[in-house]
Amino acid sequence: MQTVIVLIHLMIVLALIGVVMLQRSEGGGLGIGSTGGFMSSRGTANVLTRATAILATAFFITSLALSILAGLSHRPTSIIQTGAPAEAPSAPGAPAPLGSGGGVLDALRRSGEQQQQAPAAPAAPAAPTGPEVPRSQ
């Protein structure tokens, strides 16, 4: 349904652009005015004005229909999970999953306590795999 309305909307947009481009210039913006042409009669102006109004109305109706359809399919989601996660984190220093109690400060406090209990040895630098830029030490 939404795809059909989008296609109709695009056809209306293209028709609206064409009808607006066919209308006679009033010579306001760029100082260019047409004194005559193949579509400069009074009757043609009325037809183009009515066609513009009809296409503009159809454009607004399809725009509203698309926004209503988009709103119906949108389901608000929560950033906080309410259920238990399927997997528990495997790393010992990994933060607790959402919804398991405690906040960010509690998770940081726990990770700080774990680091104080088991001080890690300084990591050895990795062997270079290719040319490197010299670094100051």
Image (cartoon, rainbow, N blue to C red):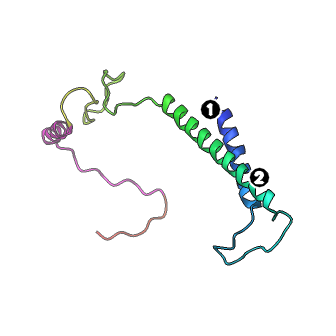
Closer to the camera in the image, 137 or 67: 67
> In the image as oriented, which residue stretches furthest toward the bottom?
31
Whether residue 42 sits left or right of residue 107 in the image: it is right
Q: Is residue 80 left or right of residue 13?
A: left
Per the model, the C-alpha gap separating discs 1 and 2 is: 31 Å
Where is residue 26? Give x, y as percent. Answer: 69, 70
Q: Give the x, y percent position of residue 67.
A: 53, 38
- Whether residue 6 sits left or right of residue 119 in the image: it is right
Q: Is residue 107 magenta?
A: yes
Specify whether residue 18 is in view. no
Task: Report the residue at 77% width, 60% height from top.
Answer: 22
Q: Mark 1 or mark 2: which comes first in sequence?
A: 1
Q: Is residue 35 magenta?
A: no
Residue 33 visible in image:
yes
Q: Which quarter of the figure has residue 33? A: bottom right
Give whichever of 99, 75 is nearer the camera. 75
Is 90 or 130 nearer to us in this picture?
Answer: 90
Describe the element under mark 1 as helix, strand or loop.
helix
Residue tagged 2: 47
Q: Nearer the viewer, residue 51 or 120?
A: 51
Q: Which residues are magenta?
A: 104-129
Examine the rendered structure and indicate whether residue 110 appears above or below residue 122: above
Identity, as a three-letter code, of the amino acid under mark 2:
Val
Dot 1 surroundings within 10 Å: few (below 14), some, or many (20 or more)? few
Residue at the spot x=34%, y=31% of the render? 78
Q: Position of residue 87 (x, y in %)?
A: 35, 23
Inspect the image, locate mark 1, and give the three-letter code of the amino acid beneath it.
Gln
Give the mark count: 2
- Going by the picture, which residue comes out furthest to the front? 42
For residue 2, the mark is 1
